Image: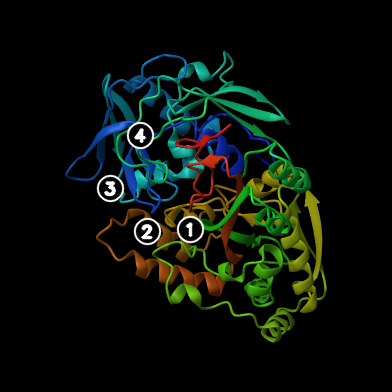
Amino acid sequence: MLTSDIRGVMPGRSPDTATGSVLQNIYEGLVAWRADGSVAPMLAEKIDTSADGRTYVFTLRDGITFHNGAPLTAKEVVWTWERFLDPKSAWPCRGAFNGTNATKIESVKALDDHRVEFQLAEPSGSFLSAMARADCDSTGIAHPDAVDANGNWATAIGTGPFRMTEWRKGQFIELTKFADYKSRTEPADGLSGAKEAKLEKVRITLIPDAQVAKLGILQGQLDLWTDVDAASIKDLASDRNVTVVTTPVAGIYTIPLQSRDPMLADPRIRQAISHAIDRSSLAKAVLDDDSIASASLIPLTSKYYGKVQRSGAEYDPDKARALIKASGYKGERIVLITSKASPVMGDTAIYLQSMLQAVGLNVDVEILEFATQFERFYSGRYQMMVWNLTPYLDPLFIIERFTGDKGRQADKVWDSPTSKELLKKLVLADENQDKQALYDELHRLQMEEAPLVVWGTRATTVAFRKSVTGFQSWAGQKPRYWNVSVAR
């Protein structure tokens, strides 16, 4: 089930969890993330890289077909990537490939039916990982029939283990087993490896009310609830027919701060907000789990979360008050935006409001529909916002998600020259370079400039009936319906 509807069917068009939870079961890209954030081939049989690191040739696997029965060829790969890179498509992931953050694709062309060549402007150590990004739906390859005569994405036609057979907006999405799916043979790992659609159909129902969802699981009307609210966990765990699992995921709980707003332009105010937040108490109150409290952009699940990432944003209300006084703040109203997308988002805003008011900040909470909040974030029209970031198994893309030039891309949060230069170094770095030192330097700069507040690593709780086998909660959070079965 989902608490909100999907936002479209173009792969990577919307990075929200609901949309990705559906589309990652439909689309596949040339590569995919393993659970540890490393990159594995998916639709590619092999990948050849030129000596200068600027040319990548992907050889496609044989026998792959789209959901409409058409064979996968290099032509569809080029067609899909032309739409990804077209500025008119407003593809949110385009900034990872157009030179905004160092990596720039100069051309994509078919060498023959089975080989596609990507030419880069400069070598980029993160290029394959950028292609695998889960928030971009692994840059999944689509068939041209997915687009209508007006150029709009009308349906989802991919190569994945499930195909979309019905989307009744505001009610449910139905996925059906793709009988002609050709699985890889490597062990299933993250979004890569072997995938088998053991279920003939998957109906993903939209249920925004947590009480309705809880009753659905307890009464057997739902098999799986993939993002259980904290208030329902104990009731579900006490039922002998239900399994409940809580897992840290590779995402973070954040409060972006609009540094171009007159109230928040002063870094002392932003630092005060950070020091006013008792992260452990907030995590305990909202999620009943203080172990996930953290101030770092790097999630606890990452190998790059170390000693430096554990420091720098201690709860200190006296320091917060001193910073507020030094800034000259005179009680002006500051609006904290949240949404009805999940109980966590609403609860976070209420607890934050209390903590910030306690140090003298005049904070009001504004609750919006998620679609409106989504638009406000991407247009940069907010002061503060509760924004829970989708998982990125490679933490580079958490940094990239927030860092960049606000003048070119309004949804960027952190646009200081030093942060952009450090991001560029990370993007270009290969696996032989010391990325930890770069992540450490970025963390120290984050504490100093406070472009946003991080209060924890995300965690997800799933509940499923005992009749469900093969389902695994994981660091990528979004549910994988392949290799799952239900006894009836």
Tag 4–tag 3 contact (CB < 8 Å): no
Q: Is residue 387 above or below residue 322?
A: above
Question: Which one is in front, 253 or 107?
Answer: 253
Q: Secondary structure at mark 3?
A: loop
Question: Which residue is drawn at the image coordinates 32% and 33% (left, top)?
Answer: 184
In the image, what residue type sits under mark 4? Answer: Leu
Q: Quadrant of residue 343?
A: bottom right
**Residue 422 image position (x, y, % from top left):** 41, 63
Q: Secondary structure at mark 4?
A: loop
Question: Which residue is drawn at the image coordinates 70% and 57% (left, top)?
Answer: 344
Which quadrant holds the C terminus? Answer: top right
- CA gap between label 4 and label 3 equals 19 Å
Indicate which disc residue 399 carries: 1
First-in-chain label (4 vs 2): 4
Q: Residues within 10 Å of mark 4 (few under 14, many from 20)?
A: many
First-in-chain label (2 vs 1): 1
The color scheme shown is rainbow
Indicate which disc residue 30 carries: 4
Tag 2–tag 1 contact (CB < 8 Å): yes
Question: Which one is in front, 376 or 193?
Answer: 193
In the image, what residue type sits under mark 3? Answer: Pro
Indicate which disc residue 123 carries: 3
Question: Does the rendering let one see residue 221?
Answer: yes
First-in-chain label (3 vs 1): 3
